[in-house]
Amino acid sequence: MIPDDEFIRVEGVPITKEEIRAVSIGKLRLNKDDVVVDIGCGSGGMTVEIAKRCKFVYAIDVDDKAIETTTKNLKKFGIKNCKVIKGNAKEILNDIDFNKAFIGGTKDIEEIIKTLNKKEIKHIVANTIVLENAIRVISLLEKYNYNVEVVNVSVSYGKKISIGYMMMAKNPITIITGKKG
């Protein structure tokens, strides 16, 4: 995994943290022939890590700053097997071919999962911070007969203080995997 501080960052554009990227990449079960869509690519942390492990990645986001930041990070890390697309994923997904999906963020989760199911995508990984969104993703995946696995990851970093190290917690992230077949 690439350390977080090596990525180009822009205020207001989220990045999936290194430890969460590691678990999410593991849950995607990537191989060199996979074509993956990264929905809500943000700063491109997942896009870069996915692209290093598969054939091709489509990175989608509605935010101009996210598109610009992802593009800069792809260039910084020499990633060429990726197309960055600005727009709403629910309108774009039908026009591209891929076999796995990573959902980092979207306001249209119902439409996205419905479309992924219609396209017969058998492997989906979604990361959520908000519990209500985790419940929605789980319910939708179950509605479309995906086998669901849920992992909640809490990461704390040690901060040196006068008497030793104090652990400083980051936001817990729920990683939901939906698989068919």
Image (spheres, rainbow, N blue to C red):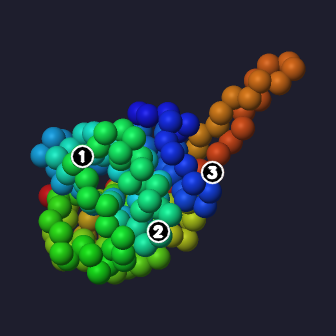
Disc 3 residue type (three-letter): Asn
Of the numbered discs in the image, which one, if any, rests on residue 64? 2
Left or right of residue 165, residue 75 in this image: left
The front one of 163 and 45 is 45
The number of numbered badges drawn on the structure is 3
* Among the two numbered marks 1 and 3 on one chain, the one whose residue lies closer to the N terminus: 1
Residue that carries the numbered disc 3 in the rendered image: 171
Residue visible at 35% across and 45% down?
75
* Among the two numbered marks 2 and 3 on one chain, the one whose residue lies closer to the N terminus: 2
Residue furthest left in the image: 33
Q: Is residue 148 above or below residue 62?
A: above
Q: CA distance from mark 2 to mark 1?
A: 20 Å
Residue 30 showing in the rendered view:
no
Pointer 2 and pointer 1: residues touching (CB < 8 Å)?
no
- Label 1 sits on a secondary structure element that is loop
Point out residue 142 in the picture as x, y percentages from the top left corner.
32, 70
Kindly indicate the quadrant of the structure image that contains residue 141: bottom left
Disc 1 residue type (three-letter): Lys
Of the numbered discs in the image, which one, if any, rests on residue 90? none
Query: Mark 1 against mark 3, which lies toward the viewer?
Result: 1
Residue visible at 55% across and 37% down?
5
Q: CA distance from mark 1 to mark 3?
A: 32 Å
Residue visible at 57% across and 54% down?
10
Residue that carries the numbered disc 1 in the rendered image: 80
